[in-house]
Image (tube, helix red, strand yellow):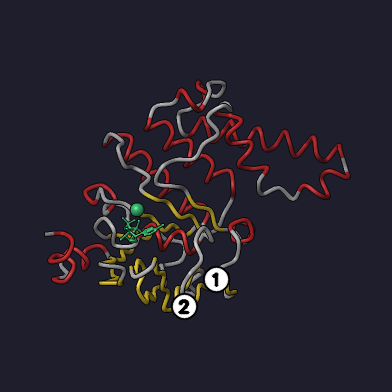
Amino acid sequence: MMSDLILDDLTKTFGGIRAVDSVSLTPRPHKINLLMGSNGSGKTTLINCISGFQRTSGGAIMFCREPITNKPPHQIFHKGIIRTFQTPRLFENLSVLENLLVAKSGTCEGFVDALFPKRWNQTEKNIKEKALSILEELGLKELQDNLAYDLSGGQIKLLELGKVLMSDCKLVLLDEPIAGINPVLAHKIFKKITQICNATKTTFLIIEHRLDIALQYANFCMVLDGGKLLASDTPDKILHNKKVIESYLR
Ligand SMILES: Nc1ncnc2c1ncn2[C@@H]1O[C@H](COP(=O)(O)OP(=O)(O)O)[C@@H](O)[C@H]1O
Ligand SMILES: [Mg+2]
């Protein structure tokens, strides 16, 4: 199957540091791909380069057969790639519901809609209904009018996932979606991701350290070590890979 994302010899340096060092990889399309590696191995930098938040130093990034290397974040978003941040970036002074509505308006085909107010109203209504049904699914509906500022850590992670769901993107990059989340909620988040992945053929590339949980849901794993790709394989093979055990799982 054609992979939607292809990294070819990707490199990102910071001064003398090779944060990402000649990495070539192709996540499995329409699957849950886990990006593993110890702290400082280059995982976040890799996602920053794919999503356009950092310029690359070398190599190429292809998405759906098109080069997206060093395009600005909004252009990459319009091509169907969304990312979350290790430290969540919500609008703290907006309500839970408003945070989802803002997420959708970012993608809006607004120009035509703005010319035809009636249609615009219908679109607005559909967007709100979609937001409410997502909040319901994530168990946040009761909190729809609360300020995002007042949410707990776990609820913030859920709302971030809600923003991803609003966007209808083809590739979702998640930076530690269950860090600091209790196991029950963490499983709930990964079950939700699995459900979305199966229902919508979205490709997920997920950075996560909580392997006890994440490996239960991953279809494919990639391991970084000092900026280099150490291994990429199915979860069961990764767990028995000598290089991975020595450098990371020890
Ligand atoms: N903005 C930056 N400036 C300088 N060095 C950076 C910057 N971002 C990351 N690094 C360095 O690049 C390496 C990879 O970092 P990072 O991608 O954050 O790793 P990970 O997400 O795997 O923990 C680390 O050595 C880190 O110190
Ligand atoms: Mg990181």
Res 205 quadrant in image: bottom left
Count of numbered badges drawn on the protein? 2
Residue drawn at 38 percent across, 68 percent down: 15
Q: Amino acid at mark 1?
A: Thr
- Residue that appears at 54% across and 41% down: 163
User: Relative to 230, is 6 on the left or the right?
Assistant: right
Q: Which of these two is toward me, 21 or 231?
A: 21
SS under mark 2: strand
Q: Nearer the viewer, residue 47 or 167?
A: 47
Quadrant where the C terminus lies?
bottom left
Q: Which residue is located at x 35 percent, y 48 percent?
A: 176
In front here: 156 or 57? Answer: 57
Q: Which mark is residue 194?
A: none
Q: Secondary structure at mark 1?
A: loop
Q: Position of residue 229 (x, y in %)?
A: 30, 72
The answer to whether 225 appears left or right of 114 in the picture is left
In contact (CB < 8 Å): disc 1 and disc 2: yes
Query: Disc 1 and disc 2: Cα gap in Å?
Result: 8 Å
Q: Amino acid at mark 2?
A: Gly
**Above-or-below relation of 68 to 82:** below
Q: Which residue is mark 2?
A: 59
Q: Is residue 186 left or right of residue 156?
A: left
To which residue does mark 1 refer? 69
